[in-house]
Image (cartoon, helix red, strand yellow):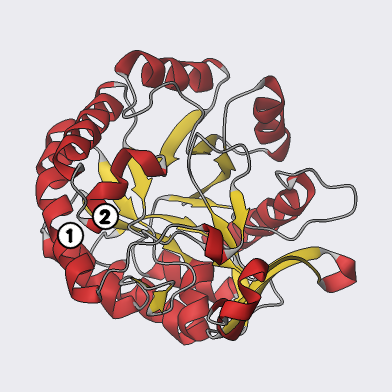
């Protein structure tokens, strides 16, 4: 196992310095700022990897395609055949560029929160979710929805009433996911790219009329078996799984998916509480014991990379959260050294 810096939008001299100062050897890019309205091209992806490697680091993974690349694939829209061709071309280009992991989600409704800057430990800024608020039409202006769309300057849109939702049932979404995977898994196998599914965040059955099918450990197990392949895996976001059911759910996921080699990589964060209400927090004050979870990863065959994830905003922190993330990475480095020495 190893630690990497996560969720960087681009590679800059500051990002490289940050990773090196923290003593990590790799980075992950989240919806990287690349040209292309419908797909990513080989030259741009190769240049991205080469820039990372020229700095003496590894590009561990790319996570999240822009929404407009595959939104019709998710909802079964009229442009899905065109979109799937672009997605397949993008996966092929990722592999040819020498990048081995693509994290993705299948959430037409995206990530929801009902607060973003609540006071946490020592007045650190934390985000959270309350299903009662999300479902109350009179409070829709309190809802914040993540939009991984290169056409938007702000990644969060406030107001559920401002989002155009296509209502879709769980059955229809499962059918769309099967169709999607049947098309992309053979491409990923040829390209030698591991596909890593992120669970739905928040893990509730429906939001805004849109089903959320990857909201349980059982659903993640079903997902990796739907189109059997060693390239169909999970991005195990511990925070999202903790939102499902705390430490028992986290350990269940690790013990189920780890021995089968189905955990591509890990987002190591936690929350306090479970759906319908939860709040993100510092490692060590949430639902699970971080040391126990790190041991479970070790004992269940996980050998990949572990990322910092959403972290509380600390005093004088940046929008990216350099200080909160540095705390998380240092914490993870200590945990990893401890379990490797046992």
Secondary structure under tag 2 reads: helix
Q: CA distance from mark 1 to mark 2?
A: 6 Å
Residue 2, position in %: x, y? 51, 48
Quarter of image, res 226: bottom left
Secondary structure under tag 1 reads: helix
The residue positioned 40% from the left and 44% from the top of the image is 67
Residue 143, position in %: x, y? 61, 68
Which residue bears the numbered disc 1? 176
Q: Nearer the viewer, residue 45 or 84?
A: 84
Residue 300, position in %: x, y? 35, 69
Q: Nearer the viewer, residue 84 or 296?
A: 84
Which residue bears the numbered disc 2? 74
1 and 2 marks in contact (CB < 8 Å) = yes
The residue positioned 48% from the left and 30% from the top of the image is 58
- The crowd level at tag 2 (other Cα within 10 Å; few <14, some 14-19, many 20+) is many
The residue positioned 34% from the left and 42% from the top of the image is 102
């Amino acid at each position: 196992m190893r630690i990497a810096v996560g969720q960087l939008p681009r590679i800059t001299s500051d990002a490289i310095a940050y990773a090196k100062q923290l003593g990590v050897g790799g980075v992950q890019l989240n919806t990287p700022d690349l040209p292309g309205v419908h797909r990513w091209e080989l030259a741009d992806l190769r240049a991205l990897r080469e820039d990372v490697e020229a700095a003496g680091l590894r590009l561990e993974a790319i996570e999240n395609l822009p929404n407009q690349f595959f939104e019709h694939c998710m909802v079964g829209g009229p442009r899905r055949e065109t979109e799937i061709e672009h997605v397949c071309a993008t996966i092929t280009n990722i592999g040819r560029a020498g990048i081995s992991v693509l994290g993705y989600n299948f959430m037409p409704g995206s990530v929801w929160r009902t607060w973003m800057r609540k006071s946490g430990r020592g007045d650190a800024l934390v985000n959270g979710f309350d299903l009662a608020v999300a479902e109350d039409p009179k409070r829709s202006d309190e809802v914040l929805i993540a939009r991984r769309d290169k056409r938007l300057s702000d990644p969060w849109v406030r107001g559920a009433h401002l989002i155009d939702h296509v209502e879709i049932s769980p059955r229809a979404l499962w059918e769309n996911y099967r169709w999607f995977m049947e098309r992309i898994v053979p491409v990923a196998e040829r390209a030698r790219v591991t596909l890593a599914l992120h669970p739905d965040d928040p893990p509730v059955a429906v939001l805004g009329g849109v089903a959320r099918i990857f909201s349980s450990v059982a659903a993640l197990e079903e997902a990796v078996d739907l189109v059997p392949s060693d390239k169909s895996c999970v991005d195990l976001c511990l925070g999202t799984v903790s939102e499902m059911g705390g430490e028992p759910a986290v350990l269940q996921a690790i013990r189920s998916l780890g021995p089968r080699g189905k955990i591509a990589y890990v987002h190591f964060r936690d929350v306090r509480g479970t759906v319908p209400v939860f709040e993100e927090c510092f490692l060590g004050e949430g639902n699970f014991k971080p040391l126990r979870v790190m041991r479970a990863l070790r004992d269940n065959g996980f050998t990949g990379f572990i990322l910092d994830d959403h972290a509380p905003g600390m005093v004088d922190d940046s929008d990216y959260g350099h200080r909160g993330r540095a705390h998380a990475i240092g914490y993870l480095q200590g945990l990893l050294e401890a379990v490797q020495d046992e």
